[in-house]
Amino acid sequence: MPQVPQTLDALAVRTWCGLALEALGRAREEIDAINVYPVADGDTGTNLYLTVESAAAAVEAVFAGYETVTGVVGPTGSAASGPDSTGGTGAGLPTLADAVRAMAHGALIGARGNSGTILAQLLRGMAQVLAADGQVDGAAGGETNGAADGETGGAAAHTDAQALRLALRQAADSAREAVAHPVEGTVLTVATAAAEAATGTEGDCGTVACAAYEGARAALMATPGQLAVLERAGVVDAGGRGLLAVLAALAETFTGESPGAGRVADEVHTRVNGMDGVSGMDGVSGVDRVDGVDRVDVNGVCVDGPPGEDSPAFEVTYLLEAEDADVARLRARLDRLGNSLVVVGGDGLWNVHVHADDAGAAVEAGVEAGRPYRIRITHFGLGDAHTTGAAGRPPRERAQRAVVAVVPGEGLAGLYAEAGATTVLARPGEPPASGELVEAVRRAHAREVVLLPNDADLRHTAAAAAEQARTEGVRVALIPTRSAVQGIAALAVHEPERRFDEDVVAMTSAAGATRYAEVAVAERQSWTMAGICQAGDVLGLIDGDVAVIGSDITATAETVLDRMLAAGGEMVTLVLGDEAPGSIAAHLEARVRESYLAVDTVAYRGGRQGALLLIGVE
């Protein structure tokens, strides 16, 4: 048997992340298939995998950074000092605090979906305890737990079973605090059971981790008795199943053997297949209580919210830079807008997840609280989605057709989402990778997808994403839109009911018939098609080329608009960035009204979109 660690150090964290990623990779499809709560969108396994993938990548980056530094300064001990050179983790390696903080941060910025966001908070809760353990030990004057020789009270190289027990408890508690309205029978229940089992167990880290796994497994098998939606579908909670895989990986890190090898899936399917005979299943509906535990009806309506037939139409997630007080107000506002609210993080960086009908309002709430970015808005689609189980529900059906669009600002993200598109936000200087576009195609969950890159520089990235999606059986049409205003024109004529080819031709024609322009501020001196510009000059770009150089934003925009309308047009679309003058839209609308007959104008707020103003002329 390979040597395994007896305490939790940086190498153990690295091993745990790798094993958890492998476990979720094996279980991803199974977990996706049993995903019915809070929304039956069949992506919990994928979301958990992506969350842990981000955590593992962050840990690997820390190790890579230490290796680089070690290679620069020379042999161990020649220039390095501090706890990274002793304590049993090996010379030049990260401390435990380094590793767990990286793990938590990676999970936070990469968290996907409801369960992924909660998992990120579970890992953050553990990191808070484990990163501080060395200071606690030093202050107590007791066990040093591998703190660097002569460095009591400093950063610990590793920690013991007691700290692991406390970390699991903090994880469960902090995850509950992050969820606006905790419901039993979910991943929260499984996490609490794991913490309680660990608390009552003596022994080393391996023993504690195995106890946590067994406690979580028992709680998972009981989840159908706590959530009516699970009971009806004949499945256990998908998020809890994912957490069980992560805890199994933790146990395997210390013991060298997975406690769930060949057993978890069998027990889950045994539980599913035995659901028909569960006492009290027949006629269960609405919200009731069993053994004092809140239950949720088949529509996923929590006891703290008004029952209803309809679930929110959108999932909205974003990272947010904001102060604690602003986040508290944000929680209250989002709680009024929707449900499945989870806000995790701290120290100025947060991950926000909510299901809401008004996606734009959910994003605007984030803008008021701080600086939201990496905004993702997913349309759940029409109809009820179910999974196969003893209750006889059919598998979740793919939508026939969906639109996936890259958008440059929060306001446009909301606008596109309200029109039914799945969006990927492109922040200035941070274009999305092909993997992000592939993931968006998967989230759209459709047989046919129209992809709108809305940027000439993304055409190769979008083409690569389209090819990847086609290998997964999705029919993808890439419309080479070069601006978000061309995408708006294409989306306006989108009709899912007509034949795919006809729809793509109509959308392509609408986009191609739309000239596009933008008004921006020059960042430096440069040669352009219109002459030399200086830093701070206002630039008017038409169809990608600088056509006007001016000093006044409104005047430059008017000149650009006049040049575009000189060739004719029926509709002008204005998309205003946050830095655009407040009166510019009214001024340009008046200009069109007074100078161009039978030309309509529509204006939208684009948010932080890079350009001051986007203009489209159809």
Image: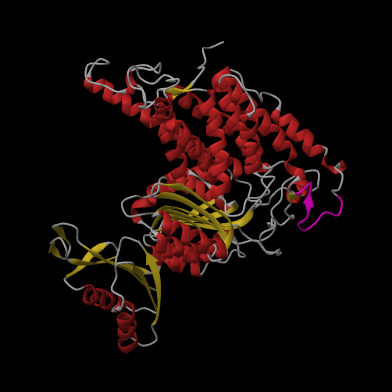
Q: Quarter of the image containing the N terminus?
A: top right
Q: Quarter of the image containing the C terminus?
A: bottom left
Outermost residue, top side: 1
At a point 71% along the width and 26% down the height, the residue shown is 263
What predominant SS class does the magenta segment belong to?
Answer: loop
Quarter location, residue 270: top right
**Picture coordinates of residue 542, whole percent (x, y):** 27, 67
291 inside magenta stretch:
yes
Is residue 26 visible in this depiction of the protein? Answer: no
The reply, left or right, for residue 21 in relation to residue 614 is: right
Magenta span: 282-292
**Location of residue 8 with respect to 535 vertically, above or below:** above
The reply, left or right, for residue 377 in relation to residue 571 is: right
68 inside magenta stretch:
no
At a point 40% along the width and 45% down the height, the residue shown is 433
**Picture coordinates of residue 155, whole percent (x, y):** 37, 27
At a point 39% along the width and 61% down the height, the residue shown is 409
Count all numbered tags in the image, as a single digit: 0
* Between 96 and 232, the one nearer to me in the picture: 96
Quarter location, residue 83: top left
The reply, left or right, for residue 179 in relation to residue 83 is: right
**Location of residue 137 with respect to 256 vertically, above or below:** below
**Location of residue 210 with respect to 370 vertically, above or below:** above
Colouring scheme applied when the structure was drawn: secondary structure
**Picture coordinates of residue 487, whole percent (x, y):** 43, 63
Is residue 599 visible in this depiction of the protein? Answer: yes
At a point 22% along the width and 20% down the height, the residue shown is 79
